[in-house]
Amino acid sequence: QVQLMESGGGVVQPGRSLRLSCAASRFTFSSYDMHWVRQAPGKGLEWVAVITYDGSKKYYVDSVKGRFTISRDNSRNTLYLEMNSLRGDDTAVYFCAREGGALRLLDFWGQGTLVTVAS
Amino acid sequence: DIQMTQSPSTLSASVGDRVTIICRASQSISDWLAWYQQKPGKAPKLLIYKASSLESGVPSRFSGSGSGTEFTLTISGLQPDDFATYYCQHHNTYWTFGQGTKVEIK
């Protein structure tokens, strides 16, 4: 069964940086586009970013453009989200998700890692 | 950008009820619409894709319909395990989610 495990969350002060990781296993990581989705406490799901299977293309939600960077290391089967200039409204559980096939569905998700931005 | 709007935000129902959740897109998305179920503290679970295709392993009491801008998720015969929050999502070029519908016990 596909496994995705996020790490790197924690408490960080406004304006600081944090890097999230998502370790993938039990599938050919280098063949799949990968996403980050977040969920603020008590709120709905918000798509954050996507990276193509080879890292050549990246897309972001407007609210994180210029502050967040999605990347991947296919040799380590790991997805990353570098978050800079963090704000209070970035507080959320961050999920990584695999985009499965031609239908472009988010078919497998990790359990999420909590990022809290507070002074 | 495409916006997805769900209604209602909260739905109170009893075991055995038939419930329907509506999702509207701000512009036509053909049938590129998925539905997810999420329980507290858990990751979302894919239920339906391409508006009406049931994901493998999902009970047949879940069904989806619609195309263009209006879609529905129906649960026929609500079970205790179905009390959760449901999200629609445009999949394909964008991955915008609706704001969610919480199905709670009446």
Image (spheres, rainbow, N blue to C red):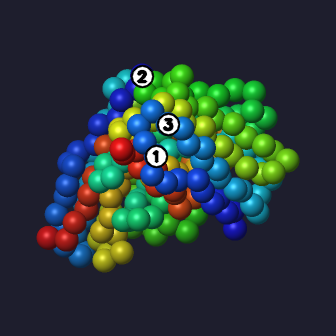
Residue that appears at 66% across and 43% down: A80
- Neighbourhood count class around disc 2 (C-alpha, 10 Å): few under 14, some 14–19, many 20 upward: few
Q: On what subunit does the disc labeled 3 rest?
A: A
Camera-nearest residue between A78 and A117? A117
Instruction: Tell me how far mark 1 sits from mark 3, CA to CA.
Output: 7 Å
Q: Residue at x 31, y 77 (%)?
A: B80
Q: Amino acid at mark 2?
A: Asp
Q: From the image, tell me which residue sits under label 2.
A: B1
Amino acid found under the numbered disc labelled 1: Val
Q: Which residue is mark 1?
A: A12
Callout 2 secondary element: loop
Q: Is residue A59 left or right of residue A55?
A: left
What's the CA distance linking mark 2 and mark 1? 31 Å
Residue B53 in picture, x, y percent from top left? 51, 52
**Quarter of the view holding residue B38:** bottom left
Q: Does residue B65 appear in the picture of this structure?
A: no
Identity of the residue drawn at 85% across and 47% down: A75
Secondary structure of the residue carrying tag 3 is loop
Tell me: B73 left or right of A71. Answer: left
Q: Could you tell me which residue is drawn at 63 percent across and 60 percent down?
A: A5
Residue at the spot of label 3: A16
Q: Chain of mark 1?
A: A
Locate the C terminus of chain A by quadrant. Answer: top left
The correct choice, above or below, for B95 with respect to A41 in the image is above
Seen in the picture, residue A113 relative to A73 is either above or below; the reply is below
Q: Amino acid at mark 3?
A: Arg
Q: Is residue A119 visible?
A: yes
**Mark 3 to mark 2 CA distance (whole Å):** 29 Å
